[in-house]
Image (spheres, rainbow, N blue to C red):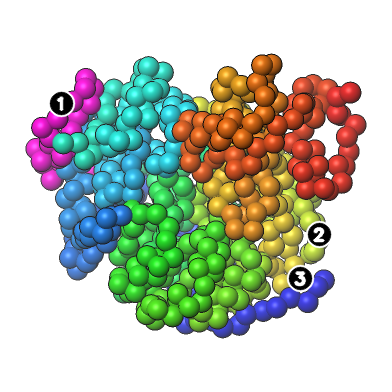
Amino acid sequence: MKNVEIINKKPVAAGLVDYEKTHKEFSWEIIKREFDIDDDKVNIAYEAIDKHAKTWRKNKVALYWEGADGTCQKYTFLEMKKLSDKCANMLRALGVKRGDRVFIFLPRLPELYIGMVAIAKLGAIAGPMFSAFGPDAVRDRLQNSEAKVLITTPELKERVDAVLWELPKLEHIVLVNHKEDEELEEGNVCYKTLMRDASDIFEMEWVKLEDPLYILYTSGTTGRPKGVTHVHNDMVSHYITTQWVLDLRDDDVYWCTADPGWVTGTVYGLWGPWLNGISFYVFDGRFDAATWYEIIQNYKVTVWYTAPTALRMLMKAGDDLVKEYDLSSLRYVCSVGEPLNPEVIRWGLKVYGLPIHDNWWQTETGSIMIANYPCLPIKPGSMGKPFPGIEAAIIDGTGSKLSAGQHGLLALKPGWPSMLRAVWGDEKRFKEYFNINGWYATGDTAYKDEDGYFWFVGRADDVINTSGHRVGPFEVESALLEHRAVAESGVIGKPDAERGEIIKAFIVLREGYKPSHELEEELKIFIRHRLAAHAYPKEIEFCANLPKTRSGKIMRRLLKAKDLGLPTGDISTLED
Ligand code: AMP
């Protein structure tokens, strides 16, 4: 095995101080006892908000919020309790009941956070959607979940209007930032008006630990996005991973840069910190290196959870910029979502004086599974070690464990509290995760070294990871086919120094259309508008045909190999 560099600059850990001992003695039952809950009478919203509103934390800030225009707001735990009570009463009056799906399509406004808590209080199921989604992505999610209510803004609603006729189950649209003197269309209601009239005392809907809490849609290789469904029981995992991996404590000001439309933003940008009574900061603006440093300086951020693409962009912005800000409040930095380059960790150590702690998990796992902990040395490039209570292994296609250093499938032993409980409405796709001898198959390939550190190798399938966002090639291909000029398309992820991967589309045009720069631009805009801003192909190549199997499936692996000049491997299934 190659010699690896080790960073031994360990911060003073607040939570996990002895990894090996904790790993040996760990039990989820013991962690669960910290909640003092009854399996049939729980609610994550009580544990995350209402409970704190009864203690000294009631006047503690739960949320520091800053808009793109510099507007600042803050909410204490008591204010959050009252506002989420009001919002829950408002939704109840609209007919929302336990088990109903309420989707949120909002920028990172305070109402997004209030709404998520309110939906949980009702025992309803929340579906946060990334605000960059276009009409197709929104339709897929609302249609599949049969959402009853949607909370959005008048601007974002325009994207929903285009597909409204395809959503017969949607009964109400709640409009945040609607101007009260403007007329409302049928089925639309004004958030502000209804909130003003709603009572701030809500009778909590107690649910079972196994009742669904939220659905987040995520991409696979084929088919429409999967509605990964999580339950209230997830809170046991949220709570303890937040303490031991993010190392949060009561006096922290924590900033998670992820949007709640992605799992990191829902779990560690909302539930995890609030279950621990932590104050966090939210910025509803775009990435800008100087602005980000200003945030850390102004809010005295102590713990920062971000992503490799952002860190690479900060690195590009240069060392001198860092020197213009006082970042001395920072004590702990974590990263997730894509491979974190050792170079970035070394740079972080130089300019921030802190090592960056990479960790690995997925929408389906519901909480961090493999991590670099404050109490362990970091091997730059490694995702770290499994969380106590998690059995991770490298297996072959039959489920046999491989030995140290061998590349294979990254798999987890099922049964941790935050594991996905269903793919909404699709039992078959849910079961597919457990096809290899009872293991949960992650879809990633990796290897484990002699010291038990896990190293990411790649995806075992065609799923693309661009700037930490998971994109299914099938979704982009389907959206491209809706354009009148496109006869066929094949979509791959192409390695990119800044974004990890970019999306590249190979396109066969219909008769009568000719390749041109204008058409290329038109197709890019088409996908941005229909699907999502992050999911459009940055590169387009027009071709006469696509490599296909004899059964007609596009061989993306071959497109990728040819594009990158790599060996094409087995092509025996290629059509003539
Ligand atoms: P998502 O479900 O959208 O959060 O995407 C999960 C996928 O992102 C994983 O299956 C990995 O392919 C990738 N991923 C997440 N964290 C890491 C990491 N620390 N290193 C490498 N890849 C990661």
Residue 512, placed above or below residue 8: above
From the image, tell me which residue sits under label 1: 183
Q: Position of residue 422 (x, y in %)?
A: 52, 36
State the residue at coordinates (54%, 75%): 348
Q: Could you say which disc has been placed on residue 406 in the image?
A: 2
Nearer-the-camera pick, 250 or 562: 562
- Mainly helix, strand or loop, the magenta region? loop
Identify whether 191 is placed above or below 375: above
The quadrant holding residue 403 is: bottom right
Magenta segment range?
180-206
Q: Is residue 209 left or right of residue 436?
A: left
| Residue under the point 52% across and 72% down | 318
Helix, strand or loop status at disc 2: loop
| Residue 367 in sight in this render | yes
Which amino acid type is shown beneath numbered disc 3? Answer: Glu
Q: What residue is at 81 percent from the left and 59 percent from the top?
A: 406
Mark 3 or mark 2: which comes first in sequence? 2
Q: Quadrant of the C terminus?
A: top right
**In-front residue for pair 573/243:** 573
Depth order, front residue of 253/23: 253
**Circle 3 residue:** 450
Res. 250 in view = no
Looking at the image, residue 383 sits to the left or right of residue 265; the answer is: right
Q: Position of residue 546 (x, y in %)?
A: 77, 28
Label 2 sits on what residue type? Answer: Gln
Residue 476, quarter of picture? top right
Q: Is 390 included in the stretch rendered in magenta?
A: no
Circle 1: residue type: Glu
